[in-house]
Amino acid sequence: MKRQSNEVMTKYLLPILLGVIVFPFLSWQGAISVIVGSFLLLIISRFRSVTFSTKLSLQNHRLIRTLQRLTSDKRVRIGLLLAILLMPLYLPRFPLEIVTLALIYVLLAMGLDIVVGLTGLLALGFIAFYAVGAYTYALLSTQFGLNFFLALPIGAVSAALVGLLVGLPVMRLKGDYLAIVTLGFGEITRIVLNNWDSVSGGPNGILGIPRPHFFGVKLASPGAYYWIILTLVALGAILIYRIVRSKTGRAWEAIREDELAAASCGIPVVRYKLLAFSLGAGFAGVAGVFFAGRMTHISPESFTFLESVMVLCMVVLGGMGSLLGVVIGALALIILPELLREAALYRMLLFGLLLIVMMRYRPQGLVPARRSERFF
């Protein structure tokens, strides 16, 4: 009886805690909206939890089965591939810019999914590695004239090395403790960039970052940016697809399911965790280099805690450990707000409600991870 009472108290304290957390970002009106919305969802869930959950699961299952039937047809696959490749030829400039931005977040979400979804490590400061990649390219290009395409692997290696250095002392931590340490690392990185004027440019950031060049040809059109980031996303997806089906992928899944059992089976847990952390950071570094080359100006304001939360939301919404799910989650959370600009003030509120609904009724995400999952 006492246990049930504690569970009810915890459940109804959660909306208040959520409101306190979002208060610094949404002001008191937004925080109250979050609390009221969360309470309403909890009350509704008490009456319709089983029915609604079952319906949502069935609808989602039918949608996945329909998509699988469609994509199993070779002609549909070829048509879909051509539509993706030739998008710059038929899509207007503004929508193409949004899709390009969404693909940057797809790359970030794929990197975070290696850490959170495949290995089970909760990281809340992931956006710091994105900043490392962006500032690496910004400094190397403006100070030494380094080419964009040479900076891509350097940015990835730099971010991976930073991930390795951060991970070495903290990989023995678990759960909330690891999340707090990574959150602190993300905030320290932002504060350092904000105050190290002589290197990072301080709050003004770095201006005049060169756009990508390929054998002397300037790649500054929206279509060129789209094809570059599409290539990076495709290479990243192939790499993850191959790793997940290798010995390394199985070791990550074993660690995620039961770290103690994995260690007792002879899996070097800390080594595989460090590998996952470094590889995920490398993905963020590549995304950061592309972001800097596309925007030509970066500042610490682009790498705040909210960005880390946004990427984590993409992974949770799509399905942790699911490559296709992560892609769908990232595209949905970037493209949908642009389509609903009238509700821009309530965007974070909607994201919060969406996450609560997902955690309550669909904790495995829109597209749950499966061993037999095929990307195309």
Image (tube, rainbow, N blue to C red):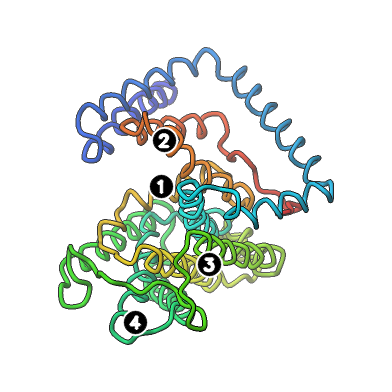
Residue 205 percent location from the top left of the image: 22, 66
Give the residue type at disc 4: Leu
Point 44% across, 22% down: residue:
4
What's the distance in space between the residues labelled 3 and 4, CA to CA?
27 Å
Give the number of the disc on residue 351: 2
Left-right relation of 35 to 4: left
Labels 1 & 2 near each other (Cβ < 8 A): yes
Residue 123 percent location from the top left of the image: 42, 56
Labels 4 & 1 near each other (Cβ < 8 A): no
Q: Quadrant of residue 329?
A: top right
Give the number of the disc on residue 318: none
Point 35% across, 85% down: residue:
145
Residue under circle 3?
Answer: 276
Residues 151 and 11: in front is: 151
Q: Which is more N-terminal, label 4 or label 2?
A: 4
Point 49% across, 16% down: residue:
46
Residue under circle 4?
Answer: 140
